[in-house]
Image: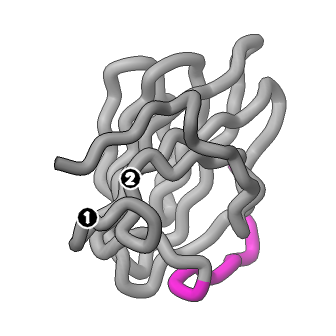
Amino acid sequence: MQRTRRGDVPAYITKDGSEIRELMHPAVHGNVHQSLAEARVPPGARTLAHVHVRTEELYHILAGQGLLQVGEAWQPVTPGDTICIPPGTVHCIENTGNDTLVLLCCCSPAYAHEDTLLHPLQET
């Protein structure tokens, strides 16, 4: 059984500019097909628009509020929302609230910097 504790996992900044904690990742924890990370976006901040070439990604909003771009569409997100982002689809998230926006990001195959391509931001 693989197990991690959030407090034991160091945070780092991804290509899109968000603070990430890889809660479970094959390169570190021995699981095989997917990764699970917690992302934090401070009030007023926005991640850089990006695309994952191979990876399907799920966002699950835990706290805060924001606007999420998936493809051409922008939609508000709040705690309890889960969104599927298909491979090859431009996306970014903006914190529109006063508190930190916290979300879980599940990637299959697992997150990899080399699978992440920055994309020109489409304005809201």
Is residue 38 or residue 2 the one in the foreground? Answer: 2
Q: Is residue 37 above or below residue 97?
A: below
The type of residue carrying mark 1 is: Asn
Q: Is residue 122 visible?
A: no
Magenta range is 114-124
Badge 2 density bin: few <14, some 14–19, many ≥20, Cα 10 Å: many
Q: Decide if residue 24 is on the left or right side of residue 44.
A: left
* Scheme by which the image is coloured: one colour
* Residue 19 x/y as whole percent: 70, 46
Q: Residue furthest right?
A: 44
Residue beneath the point at 51% across and 51% down: 22
Q: CA distance from mark 2 to mark 1?
A: 7 Å
* Residue 90 x/y as whole percent: 53, 70
Marks 2 and 1 close (CB-CB < 8 Å): yes
* Residue 122 x/y as whole percent: 69, 64
The type of residue carrying mark 2 is: Met
Badge 1 density bin: few <14, some 14–19, many ≥20, Cα 10 Å: some
Residue beneath the point at 68% across and 77% down: 119
* Residue 81 x/y as whole percent: 34, 28
Q: Which sits earlier in the primary sequence, circle 2 or circle 1?
A: 2
Quadrant in which residue 61 is drawn: top left
Which mark, residue 44?
A: none
Q: Secondary structure at mark 1?
A: loop
Q: Residue furthest top?
A: 98
Q: Secondary structure at mark 2?
A: strand
Q: Which residue is mark 1?
A: 31
In the rendered image, residue 67 lying in the magenta stretch gets the answer no
Q: Which residue is mark 2?
A: 24
Q: Is residue 120 above or below residue 115?
A: above
Q: Is residue 107 above or below residue 2?
A: below
In the rendered image, residue 120 lying in the magenta stretch gets the answer yes
